[in-house]
Image (cartoon, rainbow, N blue to C red):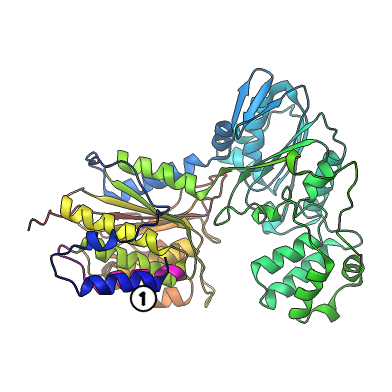
Amino acid sequence: MTFDTAAESLRRFLLRPAELSMARVLSLFQPQPFLTIVGRQKPALCKMSMASRSREIFAAAVEAVHPDTVVRQSIERKEDSVIIDGRKFTLKHNVHVVGFGKAVLGMAAEVERIMGDHLVKGVISVPHGIQQALKQHGKGHLLLKENSQIKVMEGAKHNLPDDDAQRAAERIKQLASELTEKDLLLVLISGGGSALLPAPIPPISLQEKQEVTRKLAAAGATIQELNTVRRALSLLKGGGLAHHADPAQVVALILSDVIGDPLDLIASGPTVRCEVWPEEILSILERYKLLSSLPASVNDVLARQGPRWKENKDESDTSGHVVNVVIGSNSIALQRAGRRARELGFRPVVISPGVCGDVRSVSRLYGLLARFACCREEPPPEIAEEVLRLGPEVGVESWDLCRTMQVLHEGRTEGWGATCLLAGGEPTVELTGKGRGGRNQELALRVGLELRGLKLPPNGPVFLSGGTDGQDGPTEAAGAITDAGLYDEAKAQGLDIDNFLINNDSYTFFSRLFSLSARQRLLAPGLTCTNVMDVHMLLLPALPIQIR
């Protein structure tokens, strides 16, 4: 449903008698959304503060996508076989493991426990310093055994491809290339995997490949164009790893950090065949006027005719030998958050796992939904119209927003109690300053301004935004919690919110803010060892039933 269609339905409603309720209007939108309402019974009461409950719900979301948890839930061991995604694979001391990504070490540790002595060999590429960090944070269960068959190689300092990561990629390619049709290769993939698997096609050097992609990004190339060029210059991305592993059975277990979970974009799709032709790459480079500045090695690779892979080892169709399974995602985190919300006394509603766009538009959307929900009478129709207008800007479908407003209206008229709106994704921030902060803290700060004028908790809304990886920008926080009292608290302490926003300095703002009710607004869960983007949460209080 388009915005124009939704808006026209609202306009038709506004011209009809007043006794026609908003719930009746919103019921006109028939397409089934991604929105989930967990049960219809009234939630249980809870004496915890709303801020404390928001932290509990966020913790449940993160716990649901811990690397060991998602692997354990996706692999069912039955004597000398395993079942993955409904498929049965025989174990005959034939299991090999490769992996790359920020969460892969914990995933590999769980695979090691499940497979036992059927595990023959493995190589994983993980971030520099991750093993020491896990030890320091008391997360030894995410480390491999001392005598493990899986070799751990650290690299990609500052999340950038480097020589260490390239050496790990070469070892991974070598392991895959030595497999036979009797072998089972488990490929563990998580966010950050692209930087940890750099394998430029010879004679291209790693530095030359990075320079080409850097110039493309600076010229304004889209993420799709950047990924297309990366795949064309890589031995392993775009299905290259699966190609080298043929004829072995390949099963990829994927922890997604990309909106919509597109298999070809997560870590640039090393197990998803995506043929790239040189002509396509040359067209992209010409579009951004980069052809004349290409290194000779890149020109050499692009001058080769035909597809980058020749069918070999009787490889005519590898699709049946490759299984890709998303075992952890933002949707899974939101579902678990919804269950925890109900346990804590809220009626959970999942809006969308695909929120994107500028944080200013996203914050406006959440502010409008809060005002829509907190109206004791029928909310002004302008609120619903603006909500629907913002939908396309922030990646949320019109019917998801319509159903959300319908649920909020029914909650007001039927006395359902408090509501927890949940969403996820990855909004963007326009950098205008040099302060410390991240998209989650800035989003929370902007939503706090949007909530100004509403009641304070527990009679008013609470908003939380947190990164599931536990780190929001170059700070120790994952996000922040805010409410309608934020502006007045800041003003009383001489803190100019606008100046902090201009300087992208949300972390400094929240660190300096002394809450009058002794609430800690920063969200700091520490190292989580996972990443499925962000979780947004809007807790809405129960309103008195309006009887007409």
Give the residue furthest to the left: 548
Left or right of 312, for residue 188: left
Residue 490 visible in the picture: no
Q: State the residue at coordinates (48%, 40%).
A: 64
Q: Nearer the viewer, residue 253 or 46?
A: 253
Vertical arrangement, residue 140 with respect to residue 20, above or below: above
What is the chief secondary structure element of the magenta stretch? helix
Q: Nearer the viewer, residue 323 or 61?
A: 323
User: Is 189 situated above or below 497?
Assistant: above
Give above or below for 377 relative to 180.
below
Residue 380 magenta: yes
Q: Quadrant of the N terminus?
A: bottom left
Question: Residue, x 75% and y 39% (percent of image)?
Answer: 321
Residue 546 percent location from the top left of the image: 11, 57
Q: Which residues are magenta?
A: 376-392
Give yes or no for residue 32 being in the magenta stretch. Answer: no
Q: Residue at x 17, y 49 (%)?
A: 415
Residue 44 image position (x, y, % from top left): 23, 38
Q: Amino acid at mark 1?
A: Asp
**Residue 488 figure quarter:** bottom left
Q: Dividing the image into 4 quarters, which one contains the C terminus?
A: bottom left
Disc 1: which residue:
496
Q: Is residue 204 left or right of residue 543?
A: right
58 or 262, nearer to the observer: 262
> Along the horizontal axis of the image, is 539 left or right of 363?
left
The answer, for residue 214, to whether it is visible in the render is: yes
* Badge 1 element: loop
User: Which residue occupies 78% across, 75% down?
Assistant: 283
Q: Position of residue 532 (x, y in %)?
A: 54, 50
The 10 Å Cα crowd at callout 1, few under 14, some 14 to 19, many 20 or more, is few
Q: Say whether residue 213 is left or right of residue 167.
A: left
